[in-house]
Amino acid sequence: MPTIKYYLREGLLPAGVLTSPNQAHYDDEHLRRLRLVRALVDVGGLSIAAVREVLAAIDTRDDSLHNKLGAVQEAISQPGSGELDPLAVKDVQAFFERQGERDCVDVTESNVTHMLAAALSAARSVGHDHFHDLLDPYLEGLKIIARADVEYIARRGSSDDVIEGMVVGTLIGDAVIKAVRRLAHAQVSRDVIGNGSDD
């Protein structure tokens, strides 16, 4: 596990107040930043470069909270490096147009849209050419989760608390949603397909 000295060297933590030539004092803000960095690395699996991007977005002081949250979401979204299927790119662009989002001309300009195009490209590569049909119902279901997320973090107090809540909540929330989705699949499968018995 990387040490605090490593995070200091990488510029992820601010320097403490020197109390002697070999010692420094770190306050609650340092501890809080350390917890955030560790969550990004350990829970989110982000590289040091990606963590630096997240922290830069958090530390920007001259932007609205909404824009900062968007910048943080971009920074914690890692699109991967696979080649995009042109039809998957068109599917993403059509989806954004249906949703009234006009800023999706080039999906590679955004980590989030690139992630979506990469996922649809992967689906096409294994013969699921119509996976894009799920995007609209997925979005409607996920808006319920997104509202719960945003209302949860909005109660956290300062804008720094809100942004930290968004980072940690998204990373942990992704893992929770993945697990709960599997439970939902089991329950719905039992209802729709049956449990395999003949009666």
Image: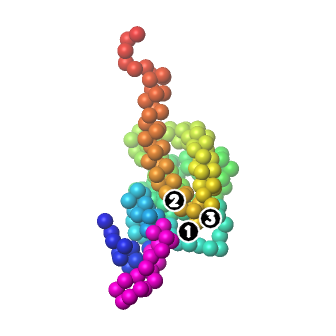
In the picture of the structure, the residue carrying the numbered disc 1 is 58
Q: Position of residue 37 (x, y in %)?
A: 44, 66
In the picture of the structure, the residue carrying the numbered disc 2 is 167
Residue 161 in view (yes/no): yes
Q: Are marks 2 and 1 in contact (CB under 8 Å)?
A: yes
In the picture of the structure, the residue carrying the numbered disc 3 is 159
Element marked by disc 3: helix
Q: Amino acid at mark 2?
A: Val
Residue 15 lies in quadrant = bottom left
Label 1 environment density (alpha carbons within 10 Å; few <14, some 14–19, many ≥20) = many
Viewer-side residue, 7 vs 94: 7
Q: Residue at x 67, y 66 (%)?
A: 64
Q: Which mark is residue 152?
A: none
Give the alpha-carbon distance from disc 3 to disc 1, as whole Å. 9 Å
Q: Position of residue 30 (x, y in %)?
A: 47, 72
Q: Quadrant of the N terminus?
A: bottom left
Q: Amino acid at mark 3?
A: Ser
* Residue 185 lies within the magenta run: no
* Residue 23 lies within the magenta run: yes
Q: Residue at x 56, y 72 (%)?
A: 59
Viewer-side residue, 125 vs 148: 148
Residue 20 lies in quadrant = bottom left
